[in-house]
Amino acid sequence: MKYDLSREEAQRLDEQDTLAPYRRQFIHAEPDLIYLLGNSLGRLPQATAHRLNDVVNGEWGQRLIRGWMEGWMELPHRVGDKIGSLLGARPGEVIVADSTSVNFYKAVLAALQLTPGRSKVVTDDLNFPSDLYILQGAVRASGGNHQLHVVPSPDGIHGPLAALEEAIDEETALVALSHTVFKSAYVYDMAAVNQIARRAGTHVVWDLSHSAGAVGVDLNAAQAEFAAGCTYKYLNGGPGAPAFLYVRRDLQESVLNPIPGWMGQQEPFEFGLEYEAAGGLRRFLTGTPSILSLSAIEPGIDLLLEAGMQQVIEKSRRQTAYLQQLCQEYLQPLGFKLRSPLQPDRRGSHLALAHEEGLRISLALQERNVLLDFRRPDNLRLSVAPLYTSYSALYDAVQQMRAVVAERLYEKYAHEAPAVT
Amino acid sequence: MKYDLSREEAQRLDEQDTLAPYRRQFIHAEPDLIYLLGNSLGRLPQATAHRLNDVVNGEWGQRLIRGWMEGWMELPHRVGDKIGSLLGARPGEVIVADSTSVNFYKAVLAALQLTPGRSKVVTDDLNFPSDLYILQGAVRASGGNHQLHVVPSPDGIHGPLAALEEAIDEETALVALSHTVFKSAYVYDMAAVNQIARRAGTHVVWDLSHSAGAVGVDLNAAQAEFAAGCTYKYLNGGPGAPAFLYVRRDLQESVLNPIPGWMGQQEPFEFGLEYEAAGGLRRFLTGTPSILSLSAIEPGIDLLLEAGMQQVIEKSRRQTAYLQQLCQEYLQPLGFKLRSPLQPDRRGSHLALAHEEGLRISLALQERNVLLDFRRPDNLRLSVAPLYTSYSALYDAVQQMRAVVAERLYEKYAHEAPAVT
């Protein structure tokens, strides 16, 4: 679809947008701020502050230790099931605990238990660095039993699907990929990769951090086995909120948690001296869950459930297509290069643009109340969070970017100041 | 010292107690509740609710992603240093991150890197079960390179110091112990155990969960090398609050984080594909820290810093001695058996009592507004949290226990209902 790229049309699109009312469910402390960083830290839902107040004062303050018997023990599972329902998983297939990297580590070491004797660990160079670091650590700890094969992307944008298919063979112990790639927003065909792995008798661990809450994921339909992901991006769970772990039901009791703590013990309050793994996914819990941060996740997820994940995904696709057209119309003539896939179904909820003055452009935009993401050397990312991003905001952000470059407003900024996830 | 065990004397002791005003720094939602579970979940400090409100609305809500550059990145270190100052560690030797069990896992696998070729992992059967489970997992993952030696306590109360000394030899890869034992409150002589290990050329990982904030710990003076511990007991950090990790400065760069995530990377925002461990203890960070839970820890620690750790430790010793005399006077004649050490310097901040009707006694007490801890089969624990436990509360709790047993008030309760952490 070809959009009319006028300011009036942006407003008209907002008026027609059935999800637009959700914008008011989030805090907008600076009403003029254009925030295109939902891929990094989602906005604060109105309900979250109230919920935390209840948990702190009503639960911890009032019920004290009794809180554990009044809902806290179930929280990793209850919130996990809600996330699972956004991702095409069944109840009991997702828990919330620890950080994304720790969950990814658990999933990787668990999946490796299924392929003894195999040596290749396959990933790509678009994967999120923390995942690569975890894989490097796992390979190092294997004492030479595993080697890491990092398949390069042909262009730094698209996943190397054909090369991966070639690399995944009967020596492959594990495949680990980001479903939506953090830099370019390339989205893997999850079912296709899972099928390639299955044919080779191996297993895939997916990182869903840049997918969950904005990009279509149907774990069961895609026959996914292991996945981890974060809750502070499109799930709006708060800075560093606990992450989630998915293990398909039929595999849960075939693998052990590599960090076997008491919360994953069959009977934690019996205090037995020998570890016995709990049935089901609970065995993948380790320590005592962080109740405050964990409680803060739920209101953001509830908003997605209420809005309907399919509506959210469709709006993300419409808005990224709209943003792409804005960029092509207003920014490409000024030297910005699109660094995301053009096919809508291979692209997540953000767009990457390259510009050699990216850092200074991002600093100039920040002073003009436009927050987006810059990564060295030249990568600018603009993210669409369907529950609170408006078409007008996208239009205005692009016009600001145009002005900053056309009028060389970035020149007064120094080459400094790192941006942050 | 021998106490006068009258109600009037309890009140007099409270009046003379210079730490008594700190009681008002905590929320007491049920003013009549006697809460002797500070060894499990500490009370909510008044300042914590305010602090969380600031972090949620002022930082996340208002500053959004900018929060990472405005203090969040330093939080694991800033709060860690404060905990370190309570425990005799230098700045840069303690970080806050993950759960206790995950930190313990990291410390164990890091310490094992220092003793290649050695096979024995030595612990005792008084250690907290989650630590034993982690050790069992580590030994299993070593593929036969390590074996776990669980040295039994002679009486289920005292640490088996002599037997440990015998077990720790030139084959010992690692020693792991709880400094204060969760069941009996036995406290190891940390310096003595470290010296035994040092002589054998091996390393000790301490779990400080039941010590931090109530029991004397001087990590540097005791030449401790590795430790982990929790913040939700005597540090009053909130349910499941992130835990801490101590690695002595001179060892930090001799070991690698076994779960090497991006927060421990030398330059996390360069997004390099190869892991390079950060200098210092930051390499032991893994994923993005949980800012809400992490921020909630600080007000409780600030109270301990303000009160002075030495004052807190001395009050804990006075109150546990007082509680011991109350128990001997009023409870031992009714069949309660003291299951904690008698020597004050070998005892932490709680007392354990055995009674075959422990479960039903705890249920009867709960109905009488006395909350304490019951563990199967017969273990009742009464904890002293010096910042908010009064002498009167200890007196009244013991009188309620006496009444419940003397008048057989527990008989109407069923043998059911598990107690919690």
Image: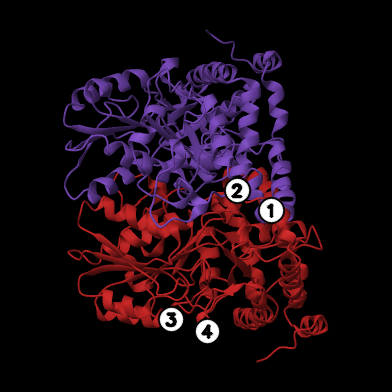
Chain colours: A red, B purple
How many angstroms separate mark 3 from mark 4 (CA)?
9 Å
Of residues B134 and A170, the one nearer the viewer is A170
In primary-sequence order, the first of circles 3 and 4 is: 3
- Label 2 close to label 1 by CB (< 8 Å): yes
Q: Which residue is mark 1?
A: B60
Q: Residue at x 60, y 82 (%)?
A: A310
Q: Quadrant of residue A254?
A: bottom left
Q: Seen in the image, is A22 located left or right of residue B270?
A: right
Chain of the residue where label 2 is placed in the rendered structure: B
Q: Which label sits in the foreground, 4 or 1? A: 4
Q: Which residue is mark 2?
A: B291
Q: Residue at x 33, y 35 (%)?
A: B254
Chain of the residue where label 3 is placed in the rendered structure: A
Query: Could you tell me the amino acid type at mark 2?
Result: Ile
Of residues B118 and B28, the one nearer the viewer is B118
Q: Circle 2 — which element?
A: helix
Q: Which residue is mark 4?
A: A345
Chain of the residue where label 1 is placed in the rendered structure: B
The vertical placement of A308 against A238, above or below, is below
Q: Which label sits in the foreground, 2 or 4? A: 4
Can residue A137 be seen in the rendering of this structure?
A: yes
Q: Seen in the image, is B328 located left or right of residue A416?
A: left
Q: Seen in the image, is B2 located left or right of residue A190?
A: right
Query: Could you tell me the amino acid type at mark 4?
Result: Asp
x and y percentages locating residue B324 in the rendered image = 49, 19
How many angstroms separate mark 3 from mark 2 (CA)?
33 Å
x and y percentages locating residue B108 in the rendered image = 33, 39
Q: Residue furthest bottom?
A: A1
